[in-house]
Amino acid sequence: MAAVPGRVVAVLRSVTHDPTDGNTWTSLMPVVAFTTLDGKEVTAYCESGLPDPAGSRDLDVTVHYAPADPAVFVLDVEAERRSWKRDMAVDVVGVLVVAAAAVVGRSRCDPGAGQARRGAGPVPPASVGTSDGPAGKHPRIPRVPPGQSCPR
């Protein structure tokens, strides 16, 4: 079977009423559109494979079809879920890398960053990182070597 992306383009609703006992049945039938690997456009009813047919309109799905007869197909809803989990994992790793870089960059200029300091007031901007000011002599102001700057 070949796999291609597809989309639920409509959901048909069928209401059946039985006059003998008065019961009414409602069924929902998604309509899926996809293009085969050789370029044929297929639009077909999908009788099963979607957990929530009522809310499936405009849903992107992976369609597995028989190349000899594209009318024979199944949906791979789990492929979309696996893709979402993979994307989430990449996003989390990216956020962790950025956070780690920020912590490392901050700690290079201020080894005491992250430690609670009592009585530490604001540092005058003119004296931070200069070799002629109190930097290096004052315990609360780190000394930054010449030619190096702290990220702000």
Image: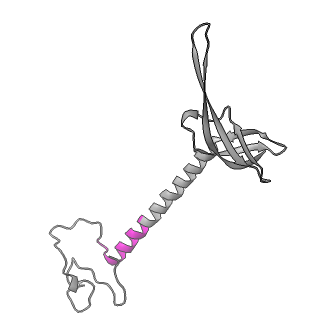
Q: Position of residue 112 (x, y in %)?
A: 28, 71
Q: Nearer the viewer, residue 112 or 127?
A: 127
Measuring 23% from the left and 65% from the top, which residue is drawn there? Answer: 116
Measuring 21% from the left and 68% from the top, which residue is drawn there? Answer: 117
The residue most toward the top is: 20
Q: Position of residue 96 (x, y in %)?
A: 45, 61
- Residue 86 visible to the viewer: yes
Q: Is residue 106 magenta?
A: yes
Quarter where residue 145 is shown? bottom left
The residue most toward the bottom is: 132
Q: Which residues are magenta?
A: 99-112
Q: Is residue 27 magenta?
A: no
Measuring 34% from the left and 90% from the top, which residue is drawn there? Answer: 146
Vertical relation: 51 (above or below) 110: above
Report how many numbered discs are placed on residues in the image. 0
Q: Nearer the viewer, residue 61 or 132?
A: 61
Q: Quadrant of the C terminus?
A: bottom left
Q: Tell me, what colour scheme is on the image?
A: one colour
Q: Nearer the viewer, residue 84 or 66?
A: 66
Vertical relation: 84 (above or below) 128: above
Our reading of the magenta stretch's main secondary structure is helix
Measuring 22% from the left and 82% from the top, which residue is drawn there? Answer: 125
Residue 50 located left or right of residue 130: right
Q: Nearer the viewer, residue 79 or 60?
A: 60
